[in-house]
Image (tube, coloured by chain):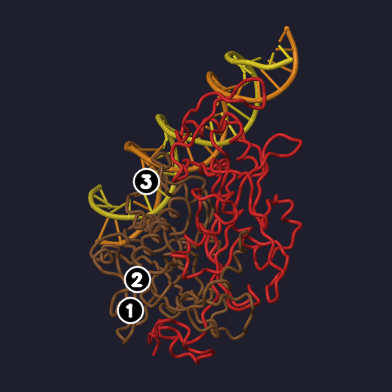
Chain colours: A brown, B red, C orange, D yellow
Amino acid sequence: MKKNVNSIAASAAPSSPAAFADVAVASIPMHARPLVTVDVVIWTVLPRPHATGFELQVLLVRRPALEGEPFPHAWALPGGFVNIDQDESLLACAVRKLQDKTGLQTHHLEQLGSWGNAHRDPRGWSATHVYMALIPAPEAVDASAQWHTLAQVADTPLAFDHRELLDAALSRLRSKVEYTSLPAFLLPEPFTLPQLQQVYEAVLGRELDKSAFRKRMLDSDFLQESGPIEGTGPRKPMSYHIRNRTHPTIFPRTFRASEGGG
Amino acid sequence: MKKNVNSIAASAAPSSPAAFADVAVASIPMHARPLVTVDVVIWTVLPRPHATGFELQVLLVRRPALEGEPFPHAWALPGGFVNIDQDESLLACAVRKLQDKTGLQTHHLEQLGSWGNAHRDPRGWSATHVYMALIPAPEAVDASAQWHTLAQVADTPLAFDHRELLDAALSRLRSKVEYTSLPAFLLPEPFTLPQLQQVYEAVLGRELDKSAFRKRMLDSDFLQESGPIEGTGPRKPMSYHIRNRTHPTIFPRTFRASEGGG
DNA sequence: ATAATAGTGTCTTTGAGACAATATTGA
DNA sequence: TCAATATTGTCTCAAAGACACTATTAT
């Protein structure tokens, strides 16, 4: 006869003291619980130095070098343990970490997924909940944090499995950029269509056709005109605001649909 | 001065005994850890009784009615606590639960995301990692489990926040069905194109154009002919196998791209 | 032959890609 | 006027939608 999955725990041999919950309830597992953390992949774009266009950047923090801390001094994604006394939910925990590092509150934040196994943290079985944030570059970031380009991060060892988490975030970002207005969340408003196209190109790592790009953006009606603005050349471009910041717009096709790509 | 997020835990007031990890490490949080569970949304299709076509079904299990168990006797998604002695990873835990309930091992299983907050489980702060499986209807399922149609589940109270998890899974499933070959994983092989179209229609809840459907399926080349087979009418339809079961095929456009939909 | 299901062909539509042409404005 | 950027227009193409048409086979 099969056991009910919810009581398997109770039949396992206790491997550590049982009294680690505030309330003793029969159905709570007797064995040790995983470590639970939240990590946030924070993206922005910064102007490319000595050149035109933008460059995609990710925010990393230095791991502390204290006794017992794994990966001392290594670069890592901002994150840390869920504090069940302080954090009402996983999302609230991610919002708190974003706020801690960037001072920003109300920007695009979505969950990427969770990674959990016995080996990713030397301190024990650990599960992390990964969120991805898209923000306009803030004036300053926390002293422990620093923006990194993809080229820089490729040359940098990262703590834990954060390389894998970052790769997954980049993959998700690029995939969504093919058919949504997400990159608009990386720019301060108002912005121009040439700027927005440069952001798309920075994220995708390839150039886009100007005419097709403008048709897509304007036809989908997610932008609101905000008057001419100073551009990078003599002719003043139109500037735009995002009509609805709560959700990105979904376009009916991907770029380069004919070449396939997920 | 801002605290490092990874040591916030150490500065919080301990609310329960500290010695609940096998190894005492300075950087491990002193407060209680969340409960960690895995839930699996298992989808299949079954022939519609007294009618043509298929109906989408989700597998639910009865909650135990033991002392201290929340939501006694309610229907719930299959799942339970992660056992760090038994489960190497979250995915392995989901595979185990799928195997327990259906006897199936090697089918499409993807992570949906995680849900965690202070209130979803009366036993304490809890985070669940939700997976979604697509399987051909098995001969039999575990005695505690039962298939439910969407109509049935709409009339059924579900344990915890499982209604929300199920809604998210349905939403993800429908969204992916618009542009991938995922529904093929719901049928036993070999199957016919009319059958596959009926599955698409069952999941999407609307009819599709036969000609456009067949063009899409055959042009994308993810099916391999497997000889004529007995169909539901006098003319014998061609049957097909899936060329590559490891990944669904991604189509270049969604169905009804012009109507937008996410 | 007929009915019922399986499968194909043709025309239209939508929206992207290529790329040329036009518009604006400071120097 | 010229250079540099911004914006628009035209033609092509891929793939979906509508819907009519042909093919196969048990009765």
Depth order, front residue of A198/B183: B183
Which residue type does callout 1 highlight? Pro
The quarter of the rendered structure image containing the N terminus of chain B is: bottom left
Residue at x 63% of width, y 26% of height: B231
* Residue indicated by mark 2: A160
For residue A52, above or below residue A94: above
Residue at x 44% of width, y 91% of height: B11
Secondary structure under badge 3? loop
**Marker disc for residue A70:** 1
Q: Are marks 1 and 3 on the same chain?
A: yes
Q: Are marks 3 and 2 on the same chain?
A: yes
Please state the chain letter of the residue tagged with numbered disc 3 in the rendered image: A
**Dot placed on the residue nearer the N-terminal end, 1 or 3:** 1
Please state the chain letter of the residue tagged with numbered disc 1 in the rendered image: A
Q: Are marks 2 and 1 on the same chain?
A: yes
Give the quadrant of residue A67: bottom left
Given the current orientation, which residue lies at the most extreme bottom position?
B13
Q: Residues within 10 Å of mark 1 (few under 14, many from 20)?
A: some
Residue B201 horizontal/vertical position (percent): 64, 40
Residue A101 horizontal/vertical position (percent): 41, 79
Q: Is residue D6 left or right of residue B129?
A: left
Disc 1 + disc 3, Cβ < 8 Å: no
Given the current orientation, which residue lies at the most extreme front position?
A1
**Marker disc for residue A209:** 3
Secondary structure under badge 2? loop
Residue B126 horizontal/vertical position (percent): 57, 74
